[in-house]
Image: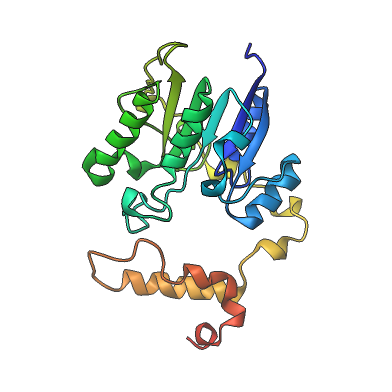
Amino acid sequence: MIKPFTFIDLFCGIGGFHQAMSDLGGTCLYASDIDADCRKTYERNYGIMPDGDITKVDAADIPAHDVLCAGFPCQAFSKAGKRLGFADSTKGTLFFDIMRILEHHRPKYALLENVRNLASHDKGNTWNVIHESLETAGYNVLDEPVIFSPHYIGVPQHRERVFIMCVRKDIGELPNFYFNPENIPGCSIDDILLDDAEIPDLKAYQLSGEQIEWIDNWNEFIRGIRCDRLPGFPIWSDSLCAVEDNPMIRSG
């Protein structure tokens, strides 16, 4: 049985870490996120209003805690971004704010999360900096980043992420993490979707006929061209929600 513990939730978003930690018996003492809408949602979900920009928060103002959780921003390391890593002065250096807080409070454990590409970014140099920083601060960390995805445990979402598990050296060693990729349970989106009859105000969640026609036309266009390299994300994705308000899209 897991004993009650306390945690803080950095770069908290709308509360993914909070949900998991509270389900395990944890009590959140502090949260932080720079996005105002996320902070409002977090407060509504959990009754805690997160602080804003963590770079402006004095570590001494954060309560002492057992576990530091941080899903630090991924844009600087993601394949969908410029991949500037630590050279990105806006997003890439926020890991060192985690280190600042970790070194001040020295919690028993830390659990960090980032995109899959963090494991290989800058030919492994980014991981080496993170690993060495945590080790130097007095934490045991596995030599290799742990890569995990919800679909490994039967949740129908393929979303590989790097997890960095840290335990203070005076507490103990980390056990090796092993997962058998040959033993992934079957899963399907149909397992979790509601039937249309169970959804109130169904039309509010459905694409319009115009939107469906637009997507079908795009797919037909893609199938009809020969090109080895295409954008990683559909070029229309940012505008999908604004189809009705965009005369260029309506006429195109």
| Residue closest to the eye, 22 or 32 | 32
Q: Quadrant of residue 99?
A: top left
Who's the residue at 72% across and 41% down the image?
Answer: 48
Q: How is the image coloured?
A: rainbow
Q: How many numbered marks are there?
A: 0
User: Is residue 174 visible in this depiction of the protein?
Assistant: yes
What residue is shown at x 46% (from left), y 36% (from top)? 100
Residue 120 position within the rendered picture, expressed as x and y whole percent measured from the top left: 27, 41
Let me know if residue 149 appears in the view: no
Say whether residue 184 is left or right of residue 203. left
Which residue is found at the position 73% from the left and 43% from the top? 45
Seen in the picture, residue 129 relative to 35 is either above or below; the reply is above
Residue 93: image location, x then y, percent: 40, 47
- Report x, y in % for residue 251: 51, 88
Residue shown at the point (55%, 36%) measured from the top left: 59
Above-or-below relation of 132 to 249: above
Quadrant where the image shows the N terminus? top right
Residue 161: percent from left, percent from top: 42, 39
Taking 188 as reference, is 160 left or right? left
In the image, is residue 97 above or below residue 204?
above
- Decide which of 197, 242 is in the foreground and name it: 242
**Nearer the observer, 228 or 4:** 4
Is 156 in front, or is 17? 17
